[in-house]
Amino acid sequence: MATEKDSTRPPTAEQNEEPKQDSKMSRLQIMLIALAAFALIGNAMVSASHAFGPDTGHNLAIHGAMDEFKKGIPRKLEKKRQKDGNKELPGSASDKKMDKAQDKLVTKRELPKSENRMDTAVAKSDSTTKKKQEDTPKQSKGIQNKNLPQSKIASLNCDSYGGPSNDFANEMVYWDDIHSDAQYVSPFRKKLGSRRQYMTFEPDGGGWNNIRMAMETVVGLAIATGRILVLPPQKKMYLLGKGDNKQKRHFDFDDFFPMKQMAEENAALDMITMKEFLETEAMTGNLRDKETGKPSFPPGNRTDWNGINQADYDVLREWLRTVAMVPLWRPGQCLATFPAQGNHKSIQELQEMQGTIHKEGLKWESYVGHPVPVDAAPIERMKENMAERKELCVYNETMQDEMVLHFACYHKMHLRLLVHFYCFLFMEDWREDLWMKRFMRDHMRYNDEIQCAAARVLRAMREVARKNDPKGNSDGLFDSFHVRRGDFQYKATRIPAEEIYKNSHEQLTPNTTIFIATDERDKKFFDPLRKHYNIYFLDDFKEALQGVNSNYFGMIDQLVAAKGRIFFGTWFSTFTGFIDRIRGYRSVKDKLPGYQDGTLPTSYYYAVPKKKFEMHEYAPLHGAFFNREFPTSWRDIDKGIGELTTAAV
C-alpha cells in the first residue's frame, strides 16, 4: 500500500484560506463528509490492491495520493525541506545545489479568464475526446518511422563537419547496424492498435552524465512500453550554459544524440516534440486533470516552451504531473519489470518469481566472476538483476491503459532516474533484454558533430604520440586518464597528483604519452605527472576544435579518453563510467582480451585504491548503481540477433 508520506497532500496556498461558507458547516456535517471520504479511499485501495497485485506501493499513489507534488508545494514547506536537506541522493555538491533549485516548485498560476479556454472547450471536448483517441492513427505527426531506409547512424562521415577523412573517422565507430533490430517493436506497441499513448519526463537536474543516464533510461522505458516519447523543450542544462550569445546555450537532446534519425530508422521508437504534443493533445482537450476528470490546458495556453528558464520549466512540469499517471518507481528499491505478455497471468508469474527469490535470500556476491548466461530462464536472470532489491515495479494492466505516463524528477519523494538503464529495466524475454542493450549501443551514441570533433583530436593525439616515440610507437598509441576534480563531493577521490602517480605508475611506461580528460582548470596541478610522462589535454588541440560549441568539450574528452591503450578513471564518477562502457563495447567489437567475460583488463581506477582492479573481474549489479558501469551492458549482447519475432506493422 502507499505509505502515509506518499499519500498525504499538503494544502496549497489557496487551500490554506478556508472559504467563508465552510465556517458555517456543523461538526456533524464535517464528520459525515470525512467518513464518506474515508470509505471511498478504502474502496479505492481495495480495488487497487486487486488490480496491482503485491506492487501497490509503487503504483497506487499515482491515481490521486501523489497530490503533494502534482499540485505544487507551499513555500513554507519547501523552505523546511531545504533546511532538512536530502542525504540519500548521490551526485556532486553542485548537483545537489541544482537539484534543490529545481525542486522549488511554484504553485499554479491563476490564468486570466480571457486566456483560459477551459470554459469554451469543456462541453465540446467531453463528447469528442473518446472518439478522437480511437480514430487517431498510431504514428505521431512529429518524428515518424518511415520504411526503415539504410541506417545513417551506423556510418560516420565527417565531410560536413570539417573532417577528418573516413579512415580516421571510422576509428570512432563502436556501434553496429543490425537491420532485424530496427524492425522489432515492443509487444505493448502491438497491443495499442490505433491508440496513441505517450511518455513525458523530466530531465535529471545534475551534471551532463547524470542527465545522459536518465535519458537512456527514459528511452528504454519508451521502447519497452511502445509509447510515443515526448521530448522536453529546449532549455539550459546544468553546467551546459557556457559561452556567450555567439554559441548555443539552450539545448534539447537532439543536440547531443541523433534522436530524429533514431526514430526514423527504428520501428520501436516514436517521438514527438513538446510543442506538437501540446498542440495535438492538450489544446484539443484530450488531456484531463487526474483529480477532476475535466480537460486541462497548459499554463497560459502556451504550446511553445523552447528557450525557457528554470522558473517557466517548473510551471510546465508541475502541470504535466496533474494530467498524467506518475509512477512511483524508485530504482534503488525496485526492479522495473516488463512481462513478455502484458496480461494478468504473466504479471502474476513475475511476482511469484520475485517472491521465490526473496525467500532464497541470495547475495550479489554469489555472482562475482560467475555471470548468469544471457539466455537463462527469467527467474535465473532476475536473481542476478534484483541486486538485493525487495520489490518489482511491474508495467501492469492499469498502467498499460493510461494515455500518458510521466516520469518525474522529484527529490522530496526520491523520484530520480539516476541509474543505468540496464540496472533498472528487466525484460522477461532475454532476447528483448539484449535487443534493448544493443539499441543503446548502436543508437544512443553522441551525434556526428561531436564524434567528428573527437576524431580530429584523436588524429592529432596519435601524431604527437608518434613524434614522442618515432621508433617504438609507429601506431601513435597513448594512455589516458579521467581526473575528476571541480565540485566532486567524494573526498576520497580528491588526492594530490603525487598520489595519482603512486597509484598508477606500475601500469604505465616512463615517458609514455598520456591524454588527460579533466575539469581541473589549473594544469600546474599535473606537474608531478609531467615529470614522468608526456601529458596532453583537450586545450592543447584548439585547432581541431575550431567552431565547436564548448559545451561539447566534456563529451569529446570522453570519446578521446576511451581510446587510451591503458585507462585510469575516477571511482564514483559517471563520466568515467561511460568511458568504461564505451571501452566495453569496443572490447566486444574488436574481440579484445576479456570480452567474453565482460572484463576490461586495461581499465583501472586511480582513486580509490581498493577499487583499482574493479574492472578486471565480472561484477553483477550491486551497490549505488551510478558508481560504475557493469559488464552486463556489453557482455554477449549480440546473442540471439534476428530471433525476435514481433515486427513493425
Image: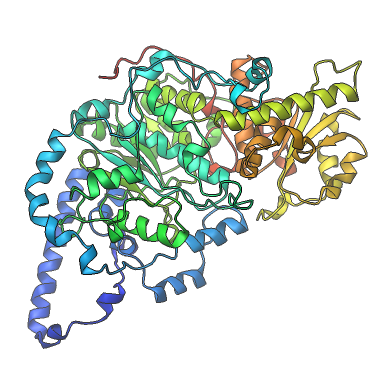
Task: Locate residue 29, reporting x and y percent.
Answer: 7, 80
Q: At 84% across and 15% down in the image, what residue appears?
A: 474
| Residue 454 visible in the snapshot | yes
Instruction: Name above or below for residue 535 compared with residue 434.
Output: below
| Residue 596 visible in the snapshot | no
Q: Quadrant of residue 530?
A: top right
Colouring mode (rainbow / by chain / secondary structure / one colour): rainbow
Task: Locate residue 537, reporting x and y percent.
Answer: 78, 38
- From the image, which quarter does the C terminus lie in? top left
Foreground residue among 220 and 46:
220
Foreground residue among 88 and 444:
444
Task: Locate residue 185, reporting x and y percent.
Answer: 32, 23
Foreground residue among 378 and 527:
527
Count of numbered marks: 0
Instruction: Name above or below for residue 324 compared with residue 605.
Output: below
Foreground residue among 168 and 518:
168
Q: At 11% across and 42% down in the image, what residue appears?
A: 130
Instruction: Name above or below for residue 637 compared with residue 208.
Output: above
Please indicate whether residue 193 sits to the left or right of residue 96 in the image.
left
- Residue lying furthest front: 246
Instruction: Name above or below for residue 252 compared with residue 106.
Output: above
- From the image, which quarter does the N terminus lie in? bottom left
Task: Locate residue 278, reporting x and y percent.
Answer: 28, 47
- Residue lying furthest bottom: 24
Q: At 40% across and 46% down in the image, what residue appears?
A: 232
Q: At 19% across and 28% down in the image, what residue appears?
A: 193
